[in-house]
Amino acid sequence: MVDFTTSIPTWASRPGEDAAGPPADGTSHVIVGVASGEVVARRWATTLPDVTVVTTDDAPAAETALAAALERARVGVRVALAGPAGACLRLRAVALGAGAEDDEIHVHATEAGTAEVFCAHCSTATATAVGVDGVVPCTGCGRDLVVYHHVSRRLGQYLGFQVDAETLPAGDVLVGLRETQ
């Protein structure tokens, strides 16, 4: 069942729920395993044809390696990602940015881990283990951000906005609004 109230992929909200593995329907495969996903990636590599495998504990290094592998890729490549949900969100953004389609990407989040929250006020990304509806201080502007149930496909980050954004500070008045009777 599809949840139309959120842009968070199902696999990101339910880590550990992927026993099937990626389909073998591509002409070649790029498999990336980050941290807890390294073992999964190595297992997948034994079952798929024409495989490029990247395994690392370093998510930014995995993003760079994935981008390089996709630059060399040809039509028919499939991408399989395994690791903490936050790392997989970022890797998925790299794959989408390189032109991959959703049906060409298989993701297995092995654990929740940390994810990045994009601050709607200063555009800083803050890494956190806080889940959706949690509050995290922005490392850029210091505002307390609500982790919203929206993930940017382009950035692979959750949206965060000021926790009390709709509350006026004491004594402030909105200019231009008339009082209704």
Image: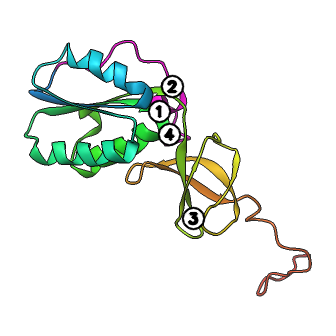
Circle 1 or circle 4, nearest the eye: 1
Estimate the spatial distance between the alpha carbons at disc 1 and disc 4, rounded to whole Å: 14 Å
Circle 3 or circle 2, nearest the eye: 2
Tell which circle, 3 or 4, labels the residue nearer the N-terminal end.
4
Contact (Cβ within 8 Å) of mark 1 with mark 3 = no
* Along the viewing direction, whichever of 8 and 181 lies nearer the viewer: 8
Magenta-colored stretch includes residue 153: no
Q: Classify mark 3: residues with Cα within 10 Å, few (<14), some (14-19) or many (20+).
A: few
The residue indicated by pointer 3 is 120
The residue indicated by pointer 1 is 84
Query: Which label is found at residue 131?
Result: none
Contact (Cβ within 8 Å) of mark 3 with mark 2 = no
Q: In the image, 13: left or right of 181?
A: left
Query: Which label is found at residue 8?
Result: 4
Range of the magenta residues?
Answer: 1-24
Amino acid identity at mark 1:
Pro
Circle 2 or circle 4, nearest the eye: 2
The residue indicated by pointer 2 is 15
Estimate the spatial distance between the alpha carbons at disc 2 and disc 4, rounded to whole Å: 12 Å
